């Protein structure tokens, strides 16, 4: 898992060493704090038929609705994708499908193209 983490971080981080901080609200009620999570399928995604959107639905959608790209900047998305990939690898859910590095790069490019920056 350590080599995969390194490969994913290097693939998704064009500016190694750049610090990124992602501030998340402390959820008191998941539905009021993150209403996008309640949506179904590709409802949050622009260009829903694109490869990146379909991959986000396939992999992110296993645990929650795929988040809208405008939720974070492109730098924040790269680290969020790495974080979620590591979470998937460490999950005890045997049915969880794991994206390969090429698929993660496509998801990152998709979120980068539609991010808030």
Image (tube, grey):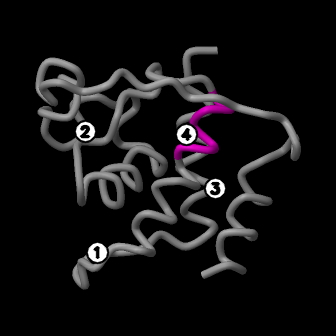
Label 2, secondary structure: give it.
loop
Instruction: Decide which of tag 3 and tag 2 comes sooner along the chain.
Output: 2
- Position of residue 117 in the picture relative to residue 47 (left or right): right
Residue with the mark numbered 2: 42
Quadrant location, the C terminus: top right
Residue with the mark numbered 1: 96
Residue drawn where x is 46% and y is 55% of the image: 84
Instruction: Decide which of tag 2 and tag 4 comes sooner along the chain.
Output: 2
Along the line of sight, which residue is nearer the eye, 41 or 12?
Answer: 12
Residue with the mark numbered 3: 105
Instruction: Decide which of tag 1 and tag 3 comes sooner along the chain.
Output: 1
The picture quadrant where one finds residue 53 is top left
The 10 Å Cα crowd at callout 3, few under 14, some 14 to 19, many 20 or more, is some
Please state the horizontal and vertical placement of residue 76, each as a whole percent of the image: 61, 32
Quadrant location, the N terminus: bottom right
Q: Are marks 1 and 3 in contact (CB under 8 Å)?
A: no
The secondary structure that dominates the magenta segment is: helix
Residue with the mark numbered 4: 110
Instruction: Decide which of tag 1 and tag 4 comes sooner along the chain.
Output: 1
């Amino acid at each position: 898992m350590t080599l995969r983490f390194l490969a994913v971080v290097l693939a998704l981080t064009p500016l190694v060493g750049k610090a990124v901080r992602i501030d998340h609200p402390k959820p008191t009620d998941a539905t009021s704090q993150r209403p996008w999570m309640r949506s179904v399928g590709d409802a949050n995604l622009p260009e829903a038929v694109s490869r990146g959107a379909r991959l986000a639905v396939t992999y992110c959608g296993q645990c929650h609705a795929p988040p809208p790209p405008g939720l974070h900047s492109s730098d924040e998305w790269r680290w969020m994708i790495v974080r979620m990939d590591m979470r998937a690898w460490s999950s005890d859910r045997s049915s969880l499908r794991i994206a390969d590095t090429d698929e993660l790069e496509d998801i990152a490019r998709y979120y980068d193209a539609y991010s808030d920056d």
